Amino acid sequence: MMTLRCASELLLPRTYEDVWYRGEAYLDRGLVKILSHDDKSVRALVKGSDEYVVTMSISGSSLARRCSCPYARGGTARSPGCKHQSAVALAWDIARRFSAPTREDIETKSMPPPLVSIFDIERARGNPLSANLEVLRLAASEGSAWVKPHARLPLAPDFERDLGRALSLDDFKQAHRTMLRWTRLPLFDPYFCAGEMIAANCEIIRAGTLRVPASSALSSALALLEAVKFHEKLLDGLIDDSDNFREFSEAHLEAFSDAVKKIKPVPTEKAYFDTTLWNYERVREKLS
């Protein structure tokens, strides 16, 4: 005889407490419509800012789930549950005569609140040049119910931040060599460390951009070219940028480029300066 499993019991440990309560509110407001269900699967519509399709199926002690909303990101088994999934799990359980989780169940069995939420990440994407880079450092580890043990990286390599000091190509190369050494740490993980690597890269570019006014046009252009080549190297296998944090580095590179282009090179260096900027643009085009 088949033993029925409670969907809420399986979903709750994969859902944040506040998200679960929002799902309860959706159900209480009558925003859930079950289209079809049996003991092992359900398909439903949930009305929110849009209308979202939720599907769930139970196999043994596993709950497969999917929601069409942006928060669910495809609804893999490792993704935190969304409020639409919570609402449907509760509605499905009611239809199968299961009791809803108690307040104590929700408080003790739900996921602890994340240090960084998807809303923090989207806010940072909205203004990458002034974003709190700590959001990137924590994002991968906080965005999943399962985290692979991985190295914690320094905030950034040593890089001179004295605004009165001229840029040199060696400044960037030395910082990049340090970051390459990080990738050889025993617990370095290309995915879980990607946000930290991007954040460190942005820290370097930010500091370099601030030093451009004290630097020559040519040395600034050479540093810019080195920066974009390292960005290319990061994306070409050093990190797994599945979360598309590259846009932060690229925004910082664009700001760096704008600062460099404002400097007028001395006549004897103009041809070399123009060629360096041309090479920079070619790399950027290749990455786009």
Image (tube, grey):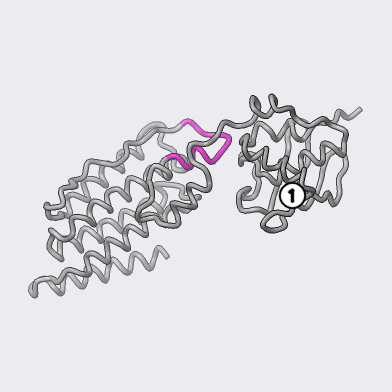
Is 269 in front, or is 145? Answer: 145
- Residue 178, how many percent across, how many down? 26, 41
**In the image, farthest residue toward the right:** 1
Q: Is residue 176 above or below residue 255?
A: above
Residue displayed at 36% across by 46% down: 199
Q: Amino acid at mark 1?
A: Val
Bounds of the magenta span?
138-149
Q: Is residue 223 above or below residue 38?
A: below
Asked if residue 193 is among those painted magenta in the image, a careful observer would answer no
Residue displayed at 64% across by 50% down: 74
Is 122 in front, or is 251? Answer: 122
Residue displayed at 65% across by 31% down: 13
- Please state if 79 lies on the left or on the right of 220 as rendered: right
Residue receiving disc 1: 54
In the rendered image, which quarter contains the C terminus?
bottom left
**In the image, farthest residue toward the front:** 29
- Please state if 100 lies on the left or on the right of 226 as rendered: right
